[in-house]
Image (cartoon, grey):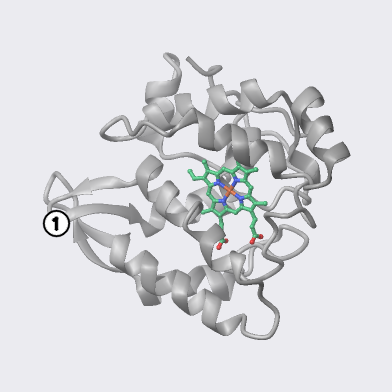
């Protein structure tokens, strides 16, 4: 089991991952450095608190954490031995440098226009209880990722489109709600993840008995 979520804390601007930022803010991971075992255990544990208990492959998370701060042999060894430096992810191999959603700018501040743009790709979804809300399913996310890649023409790497497949679809797996027409990400919950650095209440409840 991961640690119980704590009161929100500050998160380094050099951590550009909205999911990891929420885990740090929630006190589930340290802001600076965490061993690869701890990162993996925490992410897998949080994923299990999602609807449908999605199982993320620990081996894939370990591999990402190993390369996230640099691909050189010294950097790999440093991550393998010392762990992932969450506050040094910006500028690393996984940083698409603006080729993503652009919701977080280079200072990790929210770009409201980009956050609002999520709704352009969203549709009305029926949740399990029959309530309608704006949401992004797998096809919606695919259109958004393609559009993000398109608009970054001239300043993108080929690998950036592949990297996106390890971001939004995994978020869908972890934080998605079982809608009546299939799994979707609630736009309101994605907004809270980016802005408030907060996981959905239903997941927090499962993570800690006092919440
Ligand atoms: C060791 C694990 C992880 C590392 C090192 C990592 C690292 C990163 C980095 C460096 C970025 C910024 C990319 C950019 O600026 O273009 C990013 C973005 C992102 N990550 Fe993570 N991440 C990890 C795990 C996860 C997990 C488990 C999820 C989902 C549950 C996730 C969801 C996302 C999303 C949705 C984005 C945003 C892309 C955008 O704004 O377009 N990440 N991640």
Residue 6 visible in image: yes
Locate residue 170, reporting x and y percent.
Answer: 43, 47
Residue reaching furthest to the right: 74
Image quarter for residue 123?
A: bottom left
Please state which of residues 187 and 84 is positioned toward the viewer in this rendering: 84
Residue reaching furthest to the front: 73
Q: Is residue 58 above or below residue 63?
A: above
Q: Residue at x 78, y 60 (%)?
A: 107
Q: Which residue is mark 1?
A: 181
Please state which of residues 20 and 11 is positioned toward the viewer in this rendering: 20
Q: Is residue 55 left or right of residue 130?
A: right
Q: Residue at x 11, y 51 (%)?
A: 130
Q: Is residue 32 above or below residue 148?
A: above
Q: Is residue 100 left or right of residue 202?
A: right
Locate residue 8, reporting x and y percent.
Answer: 64, 33
Image quarter for residue 208?
A: top left
Image quarter for residue 101?
A: bottom right
Quadrant including the C terminus: top left
Q: Residue at x 70, y 34 (%)?
A: 9
Locate residue 195, reporting x and y percent.
Answer: 58, 53
Q: Residue at x 62, y 80 (%)?
A: 152
């Amino acid at each position: 089991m991961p640690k119980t979520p704590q009161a929100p804390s500050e998160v380094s601007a050099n951590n550009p991952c909205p999911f990891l930022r929420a885990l740090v803010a929630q006190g589930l991971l340290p802001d600076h450095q965490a061993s690869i075992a701890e990162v993996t255990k925490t992410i897998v544990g949080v994923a299990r608190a999602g609807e449908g208990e999605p199982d993320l492959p620990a081996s894939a998370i370990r591999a990402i954490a190993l390369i996230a701060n640099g691909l050189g042999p010294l950097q790999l060894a440093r991550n393998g031995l010392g762990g992932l430096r969450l506050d040094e992810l910006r500028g690393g191999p996984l940083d698409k440098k603006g080729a993503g959603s652009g919701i977080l700018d280079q200072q990790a501040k929210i770009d409201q226009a980009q956050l609002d743009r999520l709704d352009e790709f969203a549709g009305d979804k029926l949740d399990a209880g029959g309530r309608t809300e704006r949401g992004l399913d797998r096809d919606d996310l695919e259109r958004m990722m393609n559009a993000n890649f398109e608009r970054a023409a001239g300043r993108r790497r080929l690998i950036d489109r592949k990297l996106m497949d390890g971001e939004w679809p995994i978020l869908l797996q972890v934080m998605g709600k079982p809608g009546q027409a299939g799994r979707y990400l609630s736009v309101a919950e994605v907004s809270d993840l980016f802005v408030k650095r907060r996981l959905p209440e239903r997941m927090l409840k499962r993570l800690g008995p006092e919440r």
